[in-house]
Amino acid sequence: MSLPPKPPLPAGKRIKRSDQVVAGIKRWIVDTEQQAGDRLPQEAALIEQLGVSRGTVREALAALQVQGLVSVSTGPNGGATLTPPSYERCLDAVSSYLYFQPVDIRTLYALRRAVEPELAANVATRLSEADLAELEALIGLSHPAHGGSADWNARREADLLFHDRLADACDSPMLALFCRLLNDIIRRVIIVRHAQDGFDRFDEDVLHSHTGLMDAFRARDAARARELMREHMACAEALALEAEARMDRAGLLTGAEPGD
């Protein structure tokens, strides 16, 4: 099992030797169509094939482990095994990036309007009876008159879990990832920050929209599911913007800063 040589350095740019090794291993993974569970060559073979020191190889493997691409074990049969990075690791990286960035609700929902209708169409013919039963239960948990919590945040969480379950059923990893990330950003931007105990229209829209989607899912109607989700996202955006405006108005009335 041969690895490619170190990738050439870009002109005028200094790159650590271990980072070159990381890049070479990643390129090899793609070029040779390696899969999760496959093993990298042993440390001695990596040193010989890549022409680098033991310390450089170990530093490169440590970097790949931090990135979640390998797990490293010790002992006579030890070595590095390829592992798929978890969604949680991806979410942590995105959350860290956004920690000091403003998150604009209009932009957030523009993205949701693009991906959520395609998600609904993707899963319309894929949802099992168990999936449909779980989605039905989440509809109830998102409305106080149908078994939902008296807590606004808990009901919004049930709403987002409905969308998470659609992502779980999606057969496109990239589409599912984008939808899950947007849901989790909303958890940080709207839930808690925008708690609206008297804002019943959130509950009514979720009940109406999700119930309509369930009818389309049960009919295996992908085109109808796409259109209903598009309408749902437009209404959800309007409600999120109203929640934002309510929060700002409340701050003006009480003398608090917006967002307090």
Image (spheres, rainbow, N blue to C red):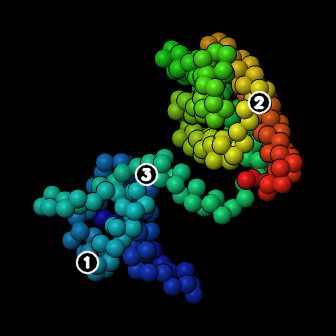
- The answer to which quarter of the image holds residue 65 is bottom left
The numbered mark, 1 or 2, whose residue comes first in the sequence reads 1
Position of residue 125 measured from the top left corner of the image (x, y, whole percent):
59, 20
* Residue 60 in the image: above or below residue 51: above
* Residue 7 in the image: above or below residue 215: below
- The answer to which quarter of the image holds residue 143 is top right
Determine the secondary structure under disc 1: helix
Between the C-alphas of marks 1 and 2, the distance is: 63 Å
Position of residue 178 measured from the top left corner of the image (x, y, whole percent):
61, 44
Q: Give, as a three-letter code, the residue at label 2.
A: Gly
- 113 left or right, relative to 86: right
Residues marked 2 and 3 touching at CB (< 8 Å): no
| Residue at the spot of label 2 | 198
Position of residue 18 measured from the top left corner of the image (x, y, whole percent):
39, 76
Q: Nearer the viewer, mark 1 or mark 2?
A: 2
Can residue 105 be seen here?
Answer: yes
- 199 left or right, relative to 19: right
| Residue at the spot of label 3 | 85
The numbered mark, 2 or 3, whose residue comes first in the sequence reads 3
